[in-house]
Image (spheres, grey):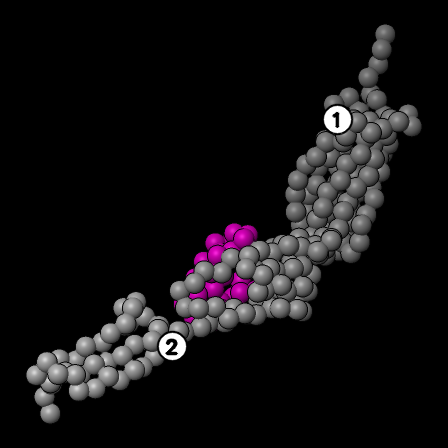
Amino acid sequence: CFWDAINIAGSPPASEPGNWSVTIDWNNSLLSTLPFTIASTNYIVTVTEVGQGTVTSTDGQINCVNGSGACSASYTSGSTVALSAAAATNWTFAGWSGAGSGSCNGGNPCSLAMTQNLSPTATFTQTYTISGQVTLAGGGLPGVTVTLSGSQSGTTDTDSSGNYSFTEAAGGSYTVIPSLSGYTFTPPGHTFTNLSGNQVGNFSATSGLRFI
């Protein structure tokens, strides 16, 4: 058999999902109309969490809390899904990994292009505080530089009441040492090994200045 023309009718273009029809003409006369449907393709986002925190999508379909709840959802091919990670108390968001995480580039929120099934993992790390007070003659000493070293490093200055604080990852080992020109401190430092809870390290300052 030979036909004058085969026409595909419908909108949008017939390469896209939707309802379509094929018309078969012979000598400018319609012989047949055959309807057909191109179904849309959907892909699944499945979120995995390590540690304690919440991952949500801006459209509300994903609300995954500590690995439970709505941790997966279906999205149309070509759509974009924005995921945000929020750590629970005493935890911090460490980053994304897994299938699809490459498009996050370490960012939070993370934007995923739905061209396949994706399974990003949000990792949360437990944290604790190392804090204390530096005193001089019973009162807080401000402006003391406290240096943290070990598994992580950092510096902070004591506030107007002589207080300082660091928030660090659990399991690490840390040392804090105070310094201020003209002063000595007892003890000279505190060391905390395998951090597994909030720790307090206080210091007593002695002025080495002499007034004549």
Q: Residues within 10 Å of mark 2 (few under 14, many from 20)?
A: few
Q: Is residue 99 above or below residue 19?
A: above
Q: Look at the numbered disc 1 and give the secondary structure of its residue.
A: loop
Q: Looking at the rendering, in which quadrant would you find the N terminus?
A: bottom left
The residue wearing badge 1 is 143
Q: Is residue 153 above or below residue 15?
A: above
User: In terms of sequence position, does the residue under pointer 1 or pointer 2 come before the other?
Assistant: 2
On the picture, is 82 further left or further right than 94? left
On the picture, is 109 further left or further right than 35? right
Residue reaching furthest to the right = 138
Measuring 41% from the left and 68% from the top, which residue is drawn there?
77
The image position of residue 19, as x and y in percent, is: 33, 76
Residue 109 located within the stretch drawn in magenta: yes
The residue wearing badge 2 is 39
- Circle 2: residue type: Ala
- The residues tagged by marks 1 and 2 sit, at their Cα atoms, a distance apart of 67 Å
